[in-house]
Image (cartoon, grey):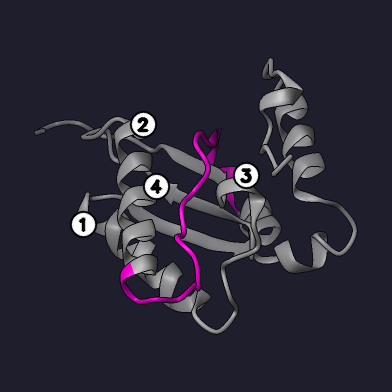
Amino acid sequence: MANTYTQIHIQVVFAAEHRKALVDGIWEDQLYKYITGILQNYGHKMIQINGMPDHMHILFGMRPMQALSVLMQQIKQDSSKWINQNGFTNRKFAWQQGYGAFSYSKSQLPKVIQYIKNQKELHRKIRLRQEYMDILRTYAIDFDEQFIFKSIH
């Protein structure tokens, strides 16, 4: 769209179904590249991506040509399909429903980039569920704990 100028920085966080640790370090870089391609194909700009075997953090510059919910549906759907087609897991892979999305100003980006880069170190000290609830509380987002990254009962 002509004469449209934006600066929208979003971090999304989402987990593997039932928080199963299925993303293997052997192929996680390929997954990050694949997801980067999805973002770029829709005109968005990857800033930082990293995660753990059970969840993902993505920081990107969002272009206002697509709804965030549609983009997230495409990322999760396409990457799940790619993981399954490549036989990276011995069971069907899927991402859990829902995601968290948080916006940042340009001045906050270096701190968020470092935070995402340090996921493996951070998760030696804190579990995903606690990390996620801390983020939600920091941003004063109302939530119901029973729906936060459900695990198998």
Look at the image and give the residue range highlighted in magenta.
85-109
The kind of residue on which mark 4 rests is: Gly
Q: Residue at x 65, y 50 (%)?
A: 19
Disc 1 marks which amino acid? Asn
Q: Main secondary structure of the magenta part?
A: loop
Q: Position of residue 145 (x, y in %)?
A: 75, 24
Q: Is residue 5 found left or right of 92 in the rendered image?
A: left
Q: Nearer the viewer, residue 44 or 98?
A: 98
Position of residue 44 measured from the top left corner of the image (x, y, whole percent): 30, 50
Seen as rendered, the residue at the extreme left is 2
Q: Position of residue 117 (x, y in %)?
A: 65, 65
Q: Residue 35 location, x and y as percent?
A: 37, 61
Q: Which mark is residue 41?
A: 1
Residue at left offset 67%, top offset 37%:
150
Question: Residue tagged by mark 2?
Answer: 69
Q: Name the quarter where the N terminus is drawn.
A: top left
For the residues labelled 1 and 4, the Cα–Cα distance comes to 13 Å
Compared to residue 84, the image places residue 54 above or below, namely above
Instruction: Tell me the crowding category of disc 4: few under 14, some 14 to 19, or many 20 or more residues within 10 angstroms, Cα based.
Output: many
